[in-house]
Amino acid sequence: MVGALFRRSLTYRALVQLGDVGILLWKTLRNLLKKPREHETFRQQLEEIGVRSMPVVSLTAAFGGLVFGFQTYIGFHRYIGAGSEAYGGPIITLGLAKELIPILVGLMISGRVGSSMAAEIGTMKITEQIDALHSLGANPVRYLVVPRMLAAFFMMPCLTLYGDIIGISAGYFYNIVLMGVNRVVYISYTTQYLELWDVITGLIKAAVFGVVIAIVGCWQGMETEGGAEGVGRATTRTVVISSIAILILNFFISKALPATLKQ
Amino acid sequence: MIRIINLQKAFGDNQVLRGVDLTVNTGETMVVIGQSGSGKSVLIKHIIGLLKPDLGEIWIDDTEVTKLDEDELQGFTKKFGFLFQGAALFDSMTVAENVAFGLERHTDYPREEIAGIVRESLARVGLHGVEHMMPFELSGGMKKRVGLARAIAYQPEIMLYDEPSTGLDPIRADAINDLINMLKRDMGVTSVVITHDMASSFKIADRIAMLYEGVILEVGTPDEIRNSRSPIVQQFIHGESQGPIKTW
């Protein structure tokens, strides 16, 4: 009785789904080094995830940097006093590189790429193309999931680094060019307090987010059932699950990684 | 030879296969008939290892398919050609890339030779000059034929056909039947055909097996099935709504 009730509970279903994702991740890792390698799919995915996401990352990072620069300026100006705004440089740069840009890029890529992976693989599933892959001697995990996960793993840090440059430049632009903050103080404080490790922390997060987005997108695609409606459900669930996972993981990675490498 | 022994499969509470026993001899065309939703496709997908049974065994010659792991199964699929109900062409690839897909994985032929085999396989199913077309540019019948060309390109020993004539007009359906017979004659393949099209069944089958309520109800030559004393078989082959088979 209790067992039957538990099996119908949300917790049970969540645990089962977590198990399914874990199994897919394990299969993907097992197939990483096995041949044949799908170079063409990997190259296509690098282009899809990396190059084609640059416009949306540019916009997001630019406006993220602007608004963060604006709020930091307001904060210093209002609570510490006029002339103190230049000390906001390290806060803007650190906040963008460590937290805001990796999260914004992760959410954008989950919406743009994760959903497209789920839709593509989901359509293949309901039209029996995944069964056809198997019948023609191609392992669906090796053919579909491995290249997507690898491409997301490599391209997410690249996009985040690109977003860092744009976001930090936008924060600088708002403070120095628009608001006339002291440039020398702003730059010297930023370079004094910012470590390479801060940027690397953001890139590590981005690589993890890349794996999450690809695995969730592929998993939802492969679980698709029920025609066009099922594909729609898979894409929506991909965005919701990977976005939540990104926000939760971001906190735990931030806590797990050392704040600084300086002694 | 394909031997299916006490195959059982359930999806949740729905027990689809309840102990299927069936033997398909080498070079034989076995047609499995049954109502929609009777588990025919589930049965055929077990033969190639796309589904794992809850219980039972499937032997292909001396290999037990149900015991193979993922990697072993991948090499083993070389023995099979599979024509899917909706052809299942890869829609991001051209016709030529679709047909070459299995060849590239199962053989180490150079690119020129593969291109030649692709042309030859397409010609065998009556298609010429379609290599560069995309699947969405093809009609339903052409898709089926490209699917067939893809399945036969690497000369499999066993062909599995899932509803080969579904969705085709009677003339094209008959052309597919001729192709199935031609493949058997020319390549000597063992075939398992899943269908509920009785005209096709009688034209292509060496033997017919009827799947009913998760078990094989009767197996026999087309004549034996025609003259079956089972009211269930008679109702099915004559397509009558009144009889022991529940319509809804």
Image (cartoon, coloured by chain):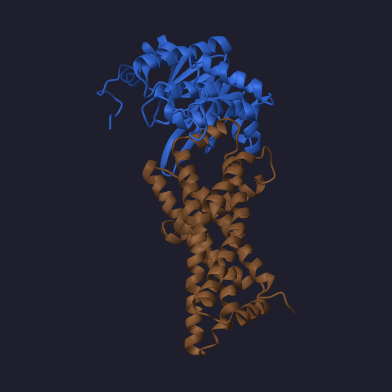
* Residue B115 x/y as whole percent: 61, 22
Considering only vertical position in the picture, is A3 above or below B101?
below
Q: Which chain is brown?
A: A
The picture places residue B180, in percent across and down from the top left corner, at 48, 15
Q: Spot the blue chain and give its letter.
A: B
Residue A90 against residue B48 in the figure, above or below: below
Which residue sits at x=48%, y=43%? A120
Q: Is residue B141 above or below residue A102?
A: above
Q: Position of residue A41 (x, y in %)?
A: 59, 41
* Residue B195: quadrant of the picture: top left
Give residue B14's position: percent from left, percent from top: 41, 40
Residue B225, placed above or below residue A156: above
Name the residue located 50 percent from the left edge and 81 percent from the top edge. A73
Judge by depth and name the residue closer to the eye, A135 or A98: A98
User: Of residues A263 and B78, which is closer to you in this image?
Assistant: A263
* Relative horizontal placement of residue B197, taking residue A245 as reference (left or right): left
Classify residue A37 as left or right of residue A2: right
Q: Is residue B25 visible?
A: no
Quadrant of the rendered image containing residue B116: top right
Residue B148 visible at all: yes
Name the outermost residue toward the right. Answer: A263
**Image quarter (top left, top right, bottom left or bottom right) of the N terminus of chain A:** bottom left
What is the quadrant of the C terminus of chain A in the image?
bottom right
| Residue toward you, A18 or A247 | A247
Q: How many marks?
A: 0
